[in-house]
Image: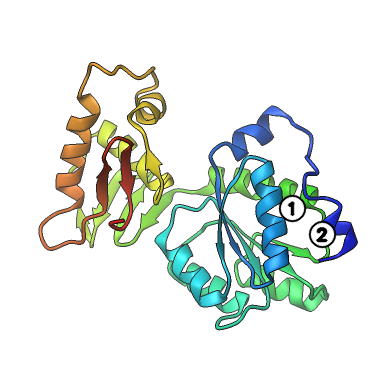
Amino acid sequence: MTPEAARDPFDHPPDHAVAKAVRARSKILVVEDDVATAAFLKTGLAANGYAVDWAGDGAEGLAAAREGGFDAIILDRMLPRMDGLTLLRALRDQSDNTPVIFLSAIGSTDERVRGLRAGSDDYLVKPFAISELLARLEVSQRRSATAVTRLAYADLTLDLLASRAERAGQALMLQPRALQLLEFLMRNAGQVVTRSMIFQKVWNYDFDPGTNVIDVYVSNLRREIDRPGLVPLLHTVRGAGYRLGPRA
């Protein structure tokens, strides 16, 4: 960790509306083996509104990334057990288009080009200022939000353009509102979403505690997603809401 970086853990970029919208509830995976650097990143990102998960080596990072639910990945170039380039190629080979920003002490042009050609969205050389990383994150997420046409989690996929969902290669019979609910759950995979959040984001009006419409839709969606013989993905978290992901 350099003195320049150490001075900058709470350096905020201009607090404009676009930046705040991009950061709201965004979840970032940091894959970094240096504990001091990881702590610096977690502190700086959390101070600017991000939720942060950390993986300390490449194999752990790949496993976490494959579980999904992340809006972006900050990836060290040199990692134990699996280097950053190998990790990134494995994700892109699986059609995982989560924005990835490389962090590396290797700043040569050749290494930057290798990182970008492997499928990264950006390449930031250490030492760096947290404000620059935040700005690059916002740009990569805005670019991703306009480009994403397909969501995937485990063997569950959603084609946003065709309004078609599949599980284990089998088409799911879902009406438009159920597809919107599935999209919201997939964009927040691994996280608990409350009934109030679903009302606001899927139905676009405030939560009404007197209706069971969400329970009905979730029940119907679960019947389609979690068919007999498949690993259950849609779970009710008692007293909290719902979560798309592995059983806790």
Image position, residue 122 (x, y; %): 70, 60
Q: How is the image coloured?
A: rainbow
Does residue 92 appear left or right of residue 162 in this picture? right
Q: Residue at x 68, y 74 (%)?
A: 77
Tell me the residue at 17%/38% (across/down): 219
- In front of the other: 100 or 51: 51
Give the position of the C terminus as an image quadrant. Answer: bottom left
Residue 124, image x, y percentages = 76, 62
Looking at the image, how many numbered discs can be counted on the residues?
A: 2
Assess disc 1: are there few (<14), some (14-19) or many (≥20) residues with their C-alpha within 10 Å of its C-alpha: many
User: Pointer 1 and pointer 2: residues touching (CB < 8 Å)?
Assistant: yes
Say if 50 sits above or below 213 in the image: below
* Amino acid at circle 2: Phe
Q: Which mark is residue 128?
A: 2
Q: Give the labeled residue for mark 1.
A: 133
Q: Is residue 58 above or below residue 65?
A: below
The disc labelled 1 sits on which kind of residue?
Leu
Q: Is residue 160 found left or right of 145 in the rendered image?
A: left
**For the residues marked 1 and 2, what is the alpha-carbon distance in whole angstroms?**
7 Å
Q: Is residue 95 visible?
A: no
| Circle nearer the N terminus (1, 2) | 2
What residue do we see at 28% from left, 57% from top?
A: 247
